Image (cartoon, rainbow, N blue to C red):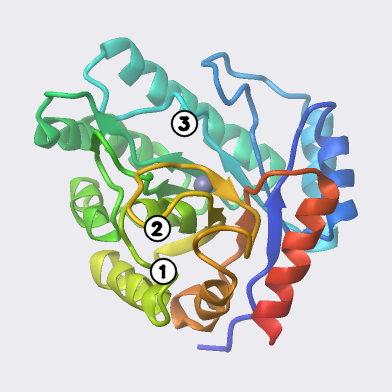
Amino acid sequence: MPPRKPSAVGSHVPVAGGLVKALAYAREIGAQAVQIFVSNPRGWAPSAGDPAHDEAFREDCGASGIAVYVHAPYLVNFGSPTEMTQVKSVEAVRHCLTRATAVGARAVVVHAGSAVAGAHRDEALAQLRTLLLPLLESAEPDGPRLLVEPTAGGGQALAATVQQLEPWFAQLDHHPLLGVCLDTCHAFAAGHDVALPGGMKKTLDALVKSVGRGRLALVHANDSKDPLGSLRDRHASIGAGHIGKDAFAELFRHSATRGVPVVVETPGDASAHRHDIELLCALRDG
Ligand SMILES: [Zn+2]
């Protein structure tokens, strides 16, 4: 296998004002990878997008070597007992995959989901098979992948720890389009002590053991405002939280992240994001 290129580093970028603005923002902060929403992240309504804008974005990102990812709306939950949520989750992810193709995205990120309090987690997990497997089987085999992102935990999370990805993948027969997006803040909140020297390595080793090599396809690099195991999802700038920057140097040193794009979802404006990207690039190259 030829050696893979070092990880591209970038950021989630706002799409308010359209994809042209998103691309300008990416250039301003020096992002080599971007994550975007293709519809209201807190609603169900799909956005058709403008085919001309989608194409221009795809071509410009392609020409600039910027890797593109789409994040599905937050309401998507394949573990929900509510039929409307189940149906709308399928529709939303199908729509994201279509728009992902249009904008040249490599993958769609979806949260691992949760069962409601008191519900049977096993039943919620089994829904992954009935709801999501047909979607994966009808998707283009060379189209965008679907990346499951473990959540910060709490309640009846279907996958918060990397070990909990194993049954998630098993329900979907380890479909070839399935991958993982690891959020460092979520992992820390769920109890993986990535702040401890060797902790990030241990977490990534466990992830590979859980779902196999080649499945980790994106990293959300976020520091955490809350301590280990908090189950809280409050992102901090790189090095400004309880995780600390050394953990991110360790992240880049692991073979599982080699060539895997890393994007921040940190607070602040463009200058804060530029600073996070510069810091991560220095940790990657240092
Ligand atoms: Zn994330």
User: SS class of the residue under badge 3?
Assistant: helix
Q: Which residue is mark 2?
A: 188
- Residue that label 1 marks: 194
- Where is residue 14, by image quadrant? top right
Q: Residue at x 83, y 32 (%)?
A: 53
How far from the left and from the top, in percent, is residue 55?
A: 79, 39
Depth check, mark 1 against mark 3: the one in front is 1
Instruction: Residue at 48%, 45% (x, y): give it.
Output: 140
> Mark 1–mark 2 contact, CB under 8 Å?
yes
User: What distance separates the C-alpha of mark 1 from that of mark 2?
Assistant: 6 Å
Q: Foreground: 243 or 17?
A: 243
Is residue 178 at least partly visible in the picture?
A: no
Q: Tell me: 5 left or right of 257.
A: right
Distance (Cα) linking label 2 and label 3: 27 Å
Mark 1 Cβ and ligand 1 under 8 Å apart: no
**Contact between labelled residues 3 and 1, with CB atoms less than 8 Å apart:** no
Identify residue type, mark 3. Val
